[in-house]
Structures are given as structure tokens and as C-alpha cells.
Image: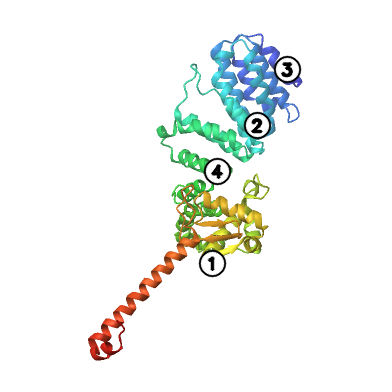
């Protein structure tokens, strides 16, 4: 209920079809009201204006004055309380179809207050209610992009990458017309964060790395983004594509000063990772980067197992299932299954002898193409190597015989067996 002063002023203003007295009330609301009653007084003011017969222009002006007053009052909860009441009241007002701009401005104001209170989900929902494609309200692409980017970022704050991606797809249709450098940067960063949340780590690493060169952000932010690129590259599935990504990041001179450089270096050179190194790296990861996969292991654990398996392929030409499992911290069957998947996906070159329970590794890099990781049959490969060695030995003996015959023809004639 409105305070006595404001109630009396509104009653007097209602007797006149002119807006002057309403304008006086909203202009002096802080002196007429008190902190305990100001929310109720502003609500009463809005109800009186929306229910009156002031005409379209005057009603718009007074609601706009109300919004300006709310912005001047540094109280986020007040903005939310009064703003939500007015947003709900506008559709039932006689002139509701003429207050689209005011309704949009109120939703933007309430959403900003929610963001200040870290209520990102409600902020996203309020922004999503702003009409951007209405025939009654033409909105420039840059303004649409600004609102959609805010929605995307708010959804990402609550880890709802599915909803965020919906609005990112809308952004893709307008960003080519937006010249604002800051909006374009936020768009690229949002796209990278969605790739990261969807576990598309290789794509996310490349996106973060590209953004880390942007002059539009501060140096510390560029280094933070570079660190995110390294984390995503480390979490990506082991294989030739990740190796190339790790190579680009390792060769970036800035990476040497980051905490992630140690584990990046070991992965780039295909060295085995220890449990202590992995645990230290995990401390700075986001929750979705530590989430469990369908087989019950975490994203990080799976990435480390695959990396150590790739490292083992550089150390051994063959290894038993049980021994490989001991090296990877798995049982033998799980080690075989992981190896089989990597070979089938073209991320590891080798073959599996299930009878003798041995994995044969082919030296060199896998092709990266699905179904191409299987190496030659080990027996056939060894036979060809043996044939090559015998041929080389025979050629060496023939060259030695020719040299002896040229230097000592009598000796050779006497000793050679025909």
C-alpha cells in the first residue's frame, strides 16, 4: 500500500487529464516517500498511470520517467520488485500495444539487476522475453546481437550450454552485419565456451588460441584465454589432431610463463604423466571439464589414459594387455578396449593379437582417419625386414668380393669355389 503522501498526491493527480501532477510525483518521489515505502509507492504510481485516461503519448512518457527513476535508485532488489510488477501490469492496460518499447526497457533493467545479484538464469529468461522480431518494433542487428550475447553468457554462467547454443545459432545469422568489435569478440568467446562445455575440446582450444591474440582485450585476459586453450588441448582425445594443436600452443612463446606449461611440454613430447602432475592440473579445471563420461571415468582421466597409451607406443614395439594395464592404471581388458578404440578411430597405429594378448605398436604418427590405425601384421612386417637385411648382407659380400678380386686376383682365383 502506498504511503499517505503519495496516495494523496495520486488521488489529486487522477482528477486531472493532464500529466503535470504525475510528473511532479515521480520527479519528487524520494522526498515524498521513504525507503520502507518507496517500492509500494512506485507500484501505486505505475498502476495509476496505466489505469488512467492520459492518452498514449503521456502514458509512454510517464512510464519512461518511472524507468529513469528506477535506474537512478541504486537498489537492484527495488528494480526487480517494481519492474516485475509493471511488466505484468502492462499487458492488461488499455494502451498495452503502445508500450512495447517501455516493456522492453523494463525487462532489460530487471535483467541487469538480476545479473548484478548473480541470478543469471532469471536474467536470461527476462532478456529472452524482449520482442526483437515484432512487426511493431524494428530492432537493428547490433541491438539484437547485444541482447542475444547477454542471453548466451547468462546461460553459460549456469552451465546450460544447450540453451546458450540456441541463441548462438541466432547470432550466426546477424553477426556478419555487426561491426562492433566488442560484440564480435564476445560472440567468438561465447562460441569457444560452448565448444568447451560440449567437450569439443580441439575446436575450443583453437578458438581460445585465436582469441588470445586479439588486441581488443587486456594482456592478462589474453594470457588467461591462452591458458584455457592449453587446458582444452590437454583434455582433447589423443591423436594426430591433438598433437598438432599441442604443437601450436607449445611453440607460442607466451605459454612458457603459464602454470600449464609443464604438463603441456610433457604431452607435446609424448612423455608419461604422473598422478601428482595430473592432480595438480585438475585443481584449476572447471566442473564440466571434470565431469564423468559414459564409461564412468572423468574427462581428464580419459584424456590422461589415452595420452599415456600414446606415450607407451613410443617406448615399446609391443606389450602385453596386463603390463599395459599396469602402466595405465587399468585392468588388462580395459587397456585392450581403449587401445582398440584408438586404433579403430585412426588415433593410434598398431594391431592387437588377442590370442597371445599382445598389442603391437607401429612406429610413427597415425593417420587420424577412422579405420586407418591398424598397422601391418607383425609377422609379415618382420619377414620383410628380415628379407631386407639378408639382401643388404648379400650386397655387402658381393662388393667385398669385387674389391678383393680387383686388388688380389690370384688369391681370389685360388680360393673361390665355383
Instruction: Name the mark nearer the viewer: 3 or 2.
Output: 2
- Quick one: SS at disc 1? helix
Residue picked out by circle 1:
315
Q: Position of residue 42 (x, y in %)?
A: 68, 23
Whether residue 369 is visible: yes
Label 1 or label 2, whichever comes before in sequence order: 2
Mark 1 and mark 4 in contact? Answer it, CB < 8 Å: no
Q: Position of residue 159 (x, y in %)?
A: 63, 40
Instruction: Name the mark nearer the viewer: 1 or 4.
Output: 1
Instruction: Name the mark nearer the viewer: 4 or 3.
Output: 4
- Quadrant occupied by the N terminus: top right
Q: Position of residue 50 (x, y in %)?
A: 63, 14
Residue picked out by circle 2:
122
Label 4 or label 3, whichever comes before in sequence order: 3
| CA distance separating discs 4 and 2 | 20 Å
Q: Quadrant of residue 90?
A: top right
| CA distance separating discs 4 and 3 | 51 Å
Q: Position of residue 58 (x, y in %)?
A: 56, 14
- Quick one: SS at disc 2? helix
Amino acid at each position: 500500500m502506498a504511503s499517505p503522501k503519495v496516495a494523496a498526491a495520486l488521488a489529486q493527480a487522477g482528477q486531472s487529464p493532464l500529466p503535470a501532477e504525475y510528473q511532479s510525483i515521480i520527479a519528487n518521489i524520494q522526498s515524498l516517500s521513504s525507503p520502507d515505502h518507496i517500492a509500494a509507492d512506485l507500484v501505486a504510481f505505475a498502476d495509476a498511470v496505466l489505469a488512467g485516461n492520459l492518452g498514449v503519448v503521456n502514458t509512454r512518457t510517464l512510464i519512461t520517467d518511472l524507468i529513469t527513476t528506477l535506474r537512478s535508485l541504486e537498489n537492484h532488489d527495488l528494480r526487480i520488485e517494481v519492474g516485475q510488477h509493471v511488466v505484468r501490469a502492462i499487458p492488461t492496460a488499455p494502451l498495452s500495444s503502445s508500450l512495447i518499447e517501455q516493456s522492453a526497457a523494463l525487462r532489460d533493467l530487471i535483467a541487469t539487476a538480476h545479473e548484478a545479484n548473480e541470478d543469471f538464469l532469471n536474467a536470461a529468461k527476462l532478456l529472452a522475453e524482449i520482442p526483437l522480431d515484432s512487426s511493431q518494433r524494428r530492432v537493428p542487428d547490433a541491438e539484437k546481437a547485444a541482447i542475444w550475447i547477454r542471453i548466451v553468457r547468462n546461460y553459460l554462467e549456469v552451465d546450460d550450454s544447450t540453451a546458450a547454443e540456441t541463441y548462438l545459432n541466432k547470432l550466426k545469422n546477424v553477426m556478419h552485419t555487426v561491426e562492433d568489435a566488442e560484440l564480435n569478440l564476445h560472440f567468438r568467446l561465447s562460441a569457444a565456451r560452448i565448444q568447451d562445455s560440449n567437450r569439443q575440446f580441439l575446436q575450443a582450444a583453437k578458438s581460445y588460441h585465436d582469441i588470445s591474440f586479439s588486441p581488443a582485450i587486456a594482456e592478462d585476459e589474453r594470457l588467461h584465454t591462452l591458458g584455457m586453450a592449453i587446458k582444452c588441448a590437454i583434455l582433447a582425445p589423443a591423436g594426430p589432431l591433438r598433437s598438432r594443436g599441442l604443437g601450436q600452443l607449445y611453440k607460442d612463446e607466451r605459454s612458457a610463463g603459464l602454470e600449464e606449461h609443464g604438463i603441456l611440454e610433457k604431452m607435446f613430447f609424448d612423455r608419461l604423466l604422473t598422478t601428482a602432475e595430473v592432480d595438480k592440473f585438475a585443481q584449476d579445471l572447471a566442473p564440466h571439464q571434470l565431469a564423468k563420461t559414459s564409461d564412468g571415468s572423468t574427462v581428464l582421466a580419459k584424456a590422461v589414459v589415452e595420452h599415456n597409451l600414446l606415450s607407451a607406443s613410443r617406448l615399446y614395439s609391443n606389450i602385453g594387455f596386463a603390463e599395459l594395464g599396469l602402466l595405465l592404471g587399468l585392468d588388462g581388458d580395459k587397456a585392450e578396449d581403449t587401445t582398440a578404440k584408438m586404433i579403430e578411430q585412426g588415433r593410434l597405429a598398431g594391431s592387437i593379437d588377442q590370442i597371445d594378448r599382445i598389442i603391437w605398436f607401429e612406429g610413427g604418427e597415425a593417420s587420424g582417419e577412422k579405420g586407418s590405425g591398424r598397422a601391418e601384421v607383425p609377422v609379415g612386417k618382420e619377414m620383410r625386414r628380415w628379407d631386407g637385411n639378408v639382401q643388404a648382407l648379400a650386397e655387402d659380400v658381393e662388393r667385398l668380393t669385387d674389391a678383393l678380386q680387383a686388388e688380389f686376383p690370384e688369391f681370389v682365383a685360388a680360393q673361390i669355389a665355383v
